[in-house]
């Protein structure tokens, strides 16, 4: 196998293992856009990785798919600065094998990535009809309804929006996953629902990010 060359070593920015993909988030991951490959299903397990330089993601994909042929790539995307890979599978052991192969292949540990940095989080209650219309302008389903509460959340690195979306839905299955953006400079999440469900979803996001920070400081 050839050895990658270049001025910069591969930097692991994000390494996220998500167990038990939730129904709405799994369906969103399977939407047919330029970044999507093999669609995942609810209940599967997924690994999300972001690296720099961007093209290094192809070496990451090769490491994962050779080590664990049973996993499927759902996202393989090279954007301006970073590369993003998502692989998923029915068996957690297969996804973990892909994870180990990636980390071993680039000489990194799972804690070597960046910590989530929440740039903004807010809940708007009793959304007006015109506000709902403008939020839904590009939606064909999973729409925000007038009178619902709207949670907006922005975080870096962008892939942490995937974790936020999945854990929010796990904690509050009644919320509507309106939109997720998890590739680029920052990740953004829009959730709609009752005030109680949205509050539960927001608390779950706060808890999972706090747990990540605690794990870094004590690990």
Image (cartoon, rainbow, N blue to C red):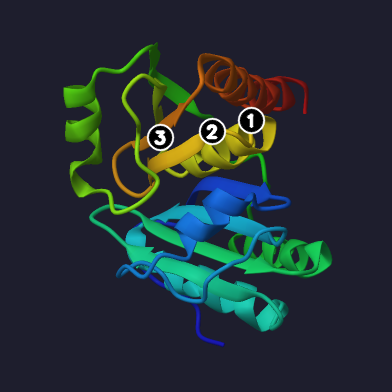
Badge 2: how crowded within 10 Å, few (<14), some, or many (20+)? many
Q: In the visual, does 158 lie left or right of 39?
A: left
Task: Specify the label residue 189 is tagged with.
Answer: 3
Badge 3: how crowded within 10 Å, few (<14), some, or many (20+)? many
Look at 53% across and 33% down and name the residue there.
Answer: 175
- Say if residue 85 shows up in the picture: yes
Question: Mark 1 against mark 3, which lies toward the viewer?
Answer: 1
Q: Quadrant of the C terminus?
A: top right
SS type, badge 2: loop
Residue 153: where, in percent of width, then height? 40, 25
Look at 80% across and 68% down and name the residue there.
Answer: 91
The Cα–Cα distance between marks 2 and 1, rounded to whole angstroms, is 6 Å
Residue 218: where, in percent of width, then height? 77, 21
- Pick whichever, 180 or 17, lies toward us: 180
- Pick whichever, 117 or 8, lies toward us: 117
Comes first in the chain, label 1 or label 3: 1
The residue under label 2 is: 175
Question: Mark 2 against mark 3, which lies toward the viewer?
Answer: 2
Comes first in the chain, label 2 or label 3: 2
- Pick whichever, 100 or 92, lies toward us: 92
Look at 23% across and 55% down and name the residue there.
Answer: 80
Question: In the rendered structure, are the residues bearing label 2 and label 1 in contact, judged by CB atoms less than 8 Å apart?
Answer: yes
SS type, badge 3: strand
Q: Is residue 101 above or below residue 180?
A: below
Q: In the visual, does 173 lie left or right of 117?
A: right
Q: Quadrant of the N terminus?
A: bottom right
Res. 78 image quadrant: bottom left
Look at 58% across and 67% down and name the residue there.
Answer: 40
The residue under label 1 is: 172
Residue 172: where, in percent of width, then height? 64, 30
């Amino acid at each position: 196998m050839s050895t990658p060359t270049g001025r910069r070593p591969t930097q692991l920015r994000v390494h996220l293992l998500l167990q038990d993909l939730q129904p709405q988030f799994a369906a969103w991951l399977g939407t047919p856009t330029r970044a999507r490959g093999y669609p995942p299903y609810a209940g599967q397990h997924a690994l999300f990785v972001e690296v720099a330089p961007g093209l290094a993601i192809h070496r990451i994909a090769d490491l994962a798919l050779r080590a664990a042929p049973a996993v499927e790539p759902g996202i393989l995307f090279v954007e301006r600065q970073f590369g993003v890979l998502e692989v998923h599978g029915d068996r957690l052991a297969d996804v973990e094998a892909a994870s180990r192969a990636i980390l071993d292949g680039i000489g990194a540990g799972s804690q070597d990535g960046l910590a989530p940095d929440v740039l903004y989080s807010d809940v708007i209650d009793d959304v007006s009809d015109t506000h709902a219309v403008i939020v839904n302008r590009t939606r064909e389903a999973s729409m925000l309804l007038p009178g619902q509460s709207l949670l907006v959340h922005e975080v870096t690195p962008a892939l942490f929006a995937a974790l936020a979306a999945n854990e929010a839905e796990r904690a509050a299955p009644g919320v509507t996953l309106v939109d997720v953006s998890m590739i680029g400079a920052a990740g953004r999440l829009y959730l709609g629902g009752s005030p109680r469900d949205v509050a539960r979803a927001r608390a779950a996001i706060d808890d999972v990010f706090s747990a990540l920070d605690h794990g870094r400081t004590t690990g």
